[in-house]
Image: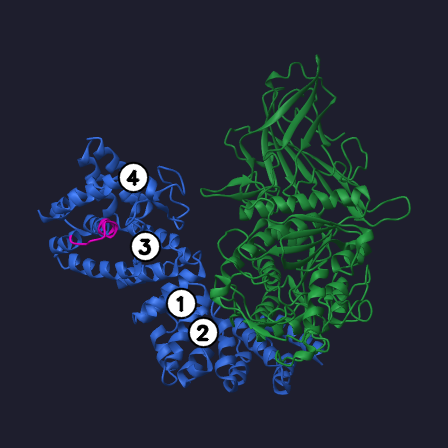
Amino acid sequence: MTRRTPHLAAAALLLAAGAHAQVSTYTQAGLGYPVPVPVDTAEAFDGFRTYDGLLTKGTEIWLAHEHVQRTQLGATIEERPIYGYTVSAGSTTVDGLPRQGGLLVAGTLHAREWGSPEIVTQYLEHLAEGYGSDAVTTWLVDQTRIVLLPVINVDGFLQTQRWPTQQYQSSDGRMRRKNMRGVDHDLFTFSDNLLGVDLNRNMSVGWSGGFPSSQTYGGTAPFSEPESNALLAAMSLFEDNEQLRCYYDVHGAIPALYVVYHNQPRIDGATQGLLNRMRATYTARNGVPNSYPGISVFPNGTIGATDEYFGYTFEVPSFTVEYPTPNYRTTGFGGATFLLPDAQVHEVVDENIFAMQLGAMFAAGPPVLETATFWRDANGDGQMQESEIVHKSRWVADGDGRVRVDLVGDGETPLGGELRVVLQFDRPMRRFEGRGGGQPANWPGQNWPLQPTVSLAVPTEGGTATIPASASGIGWLRIKTASPGVRRYEGDTWSGVVDLSGAGEILLGQDAVLSVDVQDLYGFRLDADPATHADWLPSIPGRPAGWYSYESESGADTGLGGIDRNHAVRFAAPPDGPGTNWLFFGP
Amino acid sequence: MKLRTLIPALAVAAGALLANPASAAPWTEWPEWLETPKGHGEIEFLPGMDPSQVDWEAAAVRWGGLRAQILRGEAESALDAIAREESVLLREWLLVEAALLLGERGGPQDRALLEPVAAVEPESAYLAPHCTRPHRHVLFDTATAARHGADQIAFREGFAAQAADSAQRGADLRVALRAERHPAKLAGRLAAMEPAEARMLAADARDLSTFEPTQLDALAAHLLRAGEMDALFDFARSAPAHNARRALDAWAARRAEPKGGELIELMELRRVLAPSVLAALRPVDDAPEVREALAGLLGDARLGANASMALRRVAPDAAFAAAADALQSADPARARRGLIMMMAINDAEAREAVRRFVESTEDAPALAGLRKGGAQWLGETR
């Protein structure tokens, strides 16, 4: 548990004053499940690893994967290194465009919340090992920068692992929350057991100090603790402060998602959207409705927590994730707060990896329809040959934005008949799940229409005829080597058919505009004007924080996107003799 | 056939059950997944028919003996013994167990012994706690049919066919174990299992990994008690590490002297060794062959990380030498392990070893990334 618990502070003071210093021991009989004890293994399993095991795994990932860097961001009071891991592939640009945003995930500010280092470390493992094999992970690592700090309160975490079954007044041993400021390792020297600084009260926004024996003591000053400064230093792992687009601080044990609101519509709308998506994903993974209830944080109610600092300082969606313990999915066991049963580690990690990927997707920003290709299956084999491409247009980088390049191919066709369309996006728009090649699917818990809405507005003698494109048994593609095939990622390309046979008398020399409306895995609609690169911007006078250059189809910079109408075709009179008889070019 | 003496008793029990349900007490431990004809939680029992009143651990042990008797070809005498059981509930359970076993392993003659089971009333069939869901459904459907004078032959054939499917049987056992969350009952049921079945369970990693720790602990403890060390190590290979570790710790604690070599031997190193087993190694297991084996595993993709940790834990004095040796390797995976070990050891000697590695002029492009990482680490730890 991380926040707003004055009763804990009061209880701690009362217990200290009462001089009833006692060390209590957890038992299986009392908990109803085996007392979790750390296992000295580097490999994730259905339980908790030692700090040595977590660090060994982190070091291995850093040294084994080129797209993972490790940086020492500082040292604890006991001079142990605090590491940050940066996951990002390639150069600072993607296809010549500015790199998209970043995600920062902080872990183990509170020592006793053992699920936190497992969640963050396993997310690191997921990102490292999924790169190149899992399309979504590959996209996110290609196009964002994800910074992970699995264990910030290293000293405190080690103290809890020294005493895995014993605790003192919910303050030391297994129940240590704070860092080790003024504390020795001996659980049976009682005078120091209540000391230490709550690293989630040591930030400048809303800092208030308090009593040293309080569970929520904020230290002598904001950022008085070296661990807090290491977390601040994590910002140096981004290209600049503006690259940060989302912050997570991972805690347990009262199920909640603390959400930082700004009383500004754009950023609050984006934050609320991410919150809703995360909650839906949690439920989809764990089957429990409302397993992570949202709790709002407002500017006038700050307490010195890290989510407030990052949320209000950098003006990005910011959350404190409180994974639930124990046995929130089942009943019948008493359990103890903070003691996540071994058997639930896997579930809690799983649902949080899926939720954090949503944060990374948010950081990646809105999708762009990069390329539209029109072709005609002249020989009826279903394979797109170069000679069958009658038109292709693509957005390419141009300074800070993009410019559309039109390529006209050769084709021969009567007016009417079937026109095939291949749409390539800048990311996997769908994931695939299930056997037998898999079916396109949403991100768990999300419910966007699986197929895009695609149509061609054809000018005819009788007015504009809107001809829908159908997936016609093709739809989202998985394979790169096929033709048509995906561009970079499984699921980044959609293929469909426009049947012009019922369009009537098509007018020559006028644009037939292609409309594409689709939401990506996150639920972002398309950036309807890719010429300007969508970006998350902090506030300046007269401009609140939010998405900008993220236009609707009308060109309005709503920050919400819309329908892409940037690709069009124009029918020309067939020339005499063989050769090109359709010309396609953009508006 | 002597088995037919069971029928009147069963009929009496079933009749009593149906006649006077109101005087019963609810059984609160009814498995959640079990869909009963009366709805979940609504089943009531007559005095003497309440499953919570049965000593299931003792019953499981008793069944173990009867089972062995049937497997020796003494089915009739075993069924006779079942018929003499005083507790109606226990008698029915043993009968269903015997029927399952006969259906699975017996020939046509044995299957004929199953006929009386058809007389079991539906509710009685549901009382058999060892009888898993598919079998319960078969029993229920057929017993209902029998009560209405319908086809019993279909029941026998269907029952035998289902019971004869040994794969299904294995899956059903696991389903049954999953449903059993009462530690004492689970222990009893495990005690009644044949070693082969225990081994089968232990080897089924995917299913086991979703069991509650209490259940896995019970299985590990059972294997340990039974001296089924091969099965235990199979279990350790597949089950979550903490369960294996607890079982192996218990085994190690009973050792009169360090037996790391024996442990390694038992594990048939390199063939069955698992990260979880490596996590269970303790200083008491230190032995030359253990050190050698662990050092040899450092470059292993699956086991290397835990081998390095085990070596540091079991034989700290040997860890540096092993790390230094690995650091000299041209194999990047092995060299990486050596570097990680040096970083973990992190004393002056280890830092010097990393410095030498970083400054090595040997042309080994595959190690360039490691040298860069080592240099960064030296800079950070200065």
What residue is at 61 percent from the left and 23 percent from the top? A413
Residue holding disc 4 = B20
Of all chains in the rendering, the one displayed in green is: A
A271 horizontally vs B281: left or right: right
Q: Within 10 Å of the Cα at label 4, are there few (<14), some (14-19), or many (20+) other Cα atoms?
A: few
Label 1, label 3: how many angstroms apart (C-alpha)? 35 Å
Label 3 is found on which chain of the structure?
Answer: B
A404 horizontally vs A49: left or right: right
Tell me if label 2 and label 1 are in contact, CB under 8 Å.
Answer: yes
Relative vertical location of residue A201 with respect to residue A283 in this rendering, above or below: below
Most extreme residue toward the left, as rendered? Answer: B1
What residue is at 37 percent from the left and 66 percent from the top? B220
Q: Position of residue A361 (x, y in %)?
A: 67, 48
What residue is at 40 percent from the left and 49 percent from the top? B28
Question: Same chain for the residues at labels 2 and 4, yes or no?
Answer: yes
Question: Same chain for the residues at labels 3 and 2, yes or no?
Answer: yes
The residue closer to the viewer here, A161 or B125, is B125
- Disc on the earlier residue, 1 or 3: 3
Residue holding disc 1 = B236
Q: Amino acid at mark 2?
A: Ala
Residue holding disc 3 = B53
Of all chains in the rendering, the one displayed in blue is: B
Label 4, label 1: how many angstroms apart (C-alpha)? 49 Å
- Disc on the earlier residue, 4 or 1: 4
A285 horizontally vs A556: left or right: left
Residue holding disc 2 = B280
- Disc on the earlier residue, 3 or 2: 3
Most extreme residue toward the top, as rendered? Answer: A462
- Disc on the earlier residue, 2 or 1: 1
